Amino acid sequence: MEIITSITTLRARLQAETSIALVPTMGNLHAGHLSLVRLAQQHTTCTVVSIFVNRLQFLPHEDFDRYPRTAVEDCQLLKEMDVNIVFMPDEKTLYPVPQEFRLTLPAMADTLEGAFRPGFFNGVMTVVLKLFNITQPQVAIFGKKDYQQLQLVRQMVEQLNLPIEIIAGDTIRAEDGLALSSRNRYLDAAERQEASRLAAVLAQIKNNIASGERNFGKLRQQASQTLAAHGWQSNYIAICNQQTLSPAIPDDGHLAILGAARLGQTRLIDNIEFSMPAAE
Amino acid sequence: MEIITSITTLRARLQAETSIALVPTMGNLHAGHLSLVRLAQQHTTCTVVSIFVNRLQFLPHEDFDRYPRTAVEDCQLLKEMDVNIVFMPDEKTLYPVPQEFRLTLPAMADTLEGAFRPGFFNGVMTVVLKLFNITQPQVAIFGKKDYQQLQLVRQMVEQLNLPIEIIAGDTIRAEDGLALSSRNRYLDAAERQEASRLAAVLAQIKNNIASGERNFGKLRQQASQTLAAHGWQSNYIAICNQQTLSPAIPDDGHLAILGAARLGQTRLIDNIEFSMPAAE
């Protein structure tokens, strides 16, 4: 496994490769990331994992400085998986000058996460576009855990005509259902025990819809109330059309149920896909 | 020469090429474009000329509908030059859905042409990025005639890490000095005779600076007055730093002198590069 920090070196190394997969990460790798790496390896012969904590996507008050940085452990894990290349640029490499060329995004980027973290997706999409251009992969892997990001990346690829296939990896969960996330490490023991409730209320919505409930407003309200009763501050519970992420109507066939809530100091997000049973 | 209208076909055709030059045009080709094609052919083995009148870069009141479209003549000219591929997508091919992913640009894009044509560079850079992604050329050729566009493309390539070398082609001029442009055909006979004055006043500024004049404000004012005296409405006459296109200071080594003015109904632009003689 090669660890590469320079763009020029990376490009030279990739010159002869014709089947490259990129797995963009911010490091602090857990089993969720590793499942994305495995997916990459199933699709291509050269897997590049990028590790870069992207300042552009953190709001001023957010956790950029304390975001967990564990490069040594990360590289050890990737080496054990026989990853070909780890790309770890520093900030001066990716942003040698102030990043003035950025992206404007569709309205979808202003909802859900975008509503609570203004500028977040602008930072994400800009760095993803740069990493795409640097690596020029045939395939790129994104987790469904960041569902809105995944759908925006898919739209970007289409609208900017990037010759890249986007493959989505399923969310990996702890035994109690909590979606794996680097931010889980901010939780204390009591919070960790409580944390799986977010996944549980989303699953509850799914089950209720499967059982025939069509009052989405009521389902969302119940979920928020359950979270609030257990000390959560919920940001949103949304039942959306999978592609557009606009509020679902009962006619939508493919739904995504998304939630974001704060438990103590830690903000967690999760989501679950659901396809309506075909009408009879 | 192959004429290709579909993105899929173009990509398949370019699959095996390793040395591709892209010459993006809006068609209505003249000797200026053809000199860019020649430059492309000197640098690579496969030259792609794109022809697409890009609605995104026209303001609502501008000449999108009457912009000259001469595809048959254009293809004839390119065939005589042994161009490999002409890429002529229609609007539905490049913009199958409303283009929501666009670029935000540095402040430079709001000056000069950007000040008089708000949104113009946003449209230009967005389609250039799309054409880059579709063609994935090693080299792309832009004319110095559109100087601000050229500098913005160079900055975009750098800031978005596009692995493309940008090569600039000199402006081609008629015998009387008028820069070739598709919009020259809007000029009537009297206007055509007058039109070379724009190049002449820019050259006059250059000569005056070369002779030691450092009062840039005075030079710009004289140029505007000369144009006005001959029936022009000048938009700007600017003496700029070549890279940043901000107003030049006498210490700047490399200048660009840019002008835009309207003659009757036709808006013309031109520019000239100038390097200060080294101080003694």
Image: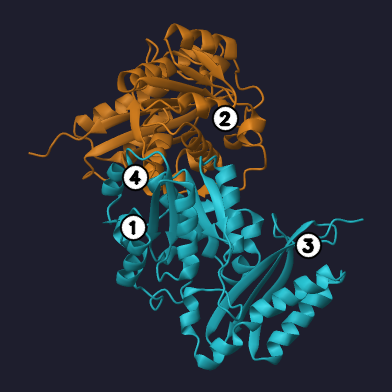
Chain colours: A cyan, B orange
Q: Earlier in the sequence, mark 2 or mark 4?
A: 2
Q: Position of residue A128 (x, y in %)?
A: 47, 54
Q: Secondary structure at mark 3?
A: loop
Tag 4: amino acid: Thr
Q: Nearer the viewer, residue B264 or A112?
A: A112
Q: Secondary structure at mark 2?
A: helix
Residue found at x 62% / y 79%: A261
Q: Nearer the viewer, residue A75 or B40?
A: A75
Residue extending farthest right: A280
Residue A25 lies left or right of residue B243; in this view the side is right
Tag 3: amino acid: Ala
Label at residue B8: 2
Q: Quadrant of residue B68?
A: top right
Q: CA distance from mark 2 to mark 4?
A: 37 Å
Question: Do dots 1 and 2 share one subunit?
Answer: no
Q: Secondary structure at mark 4?
A: loop
Tag 2: amino acid: Thr
CB under 8 Å between callouts 1 and 2?
A: no
Question: Do dots 3 and 1 share one subunit?
Answer: yes
Which residue in the protein does label 3 denote? A248
Which residue in the protein does label 4 denote? B244
Using the image, determine if residue A239 lies above or below residue B202: below
* Disc 2 residue crowd, few under 14, some 14–19, many 20+, Cα 10 Å: few
Label at residue A86: 1
Q: How many marks?
A: 4
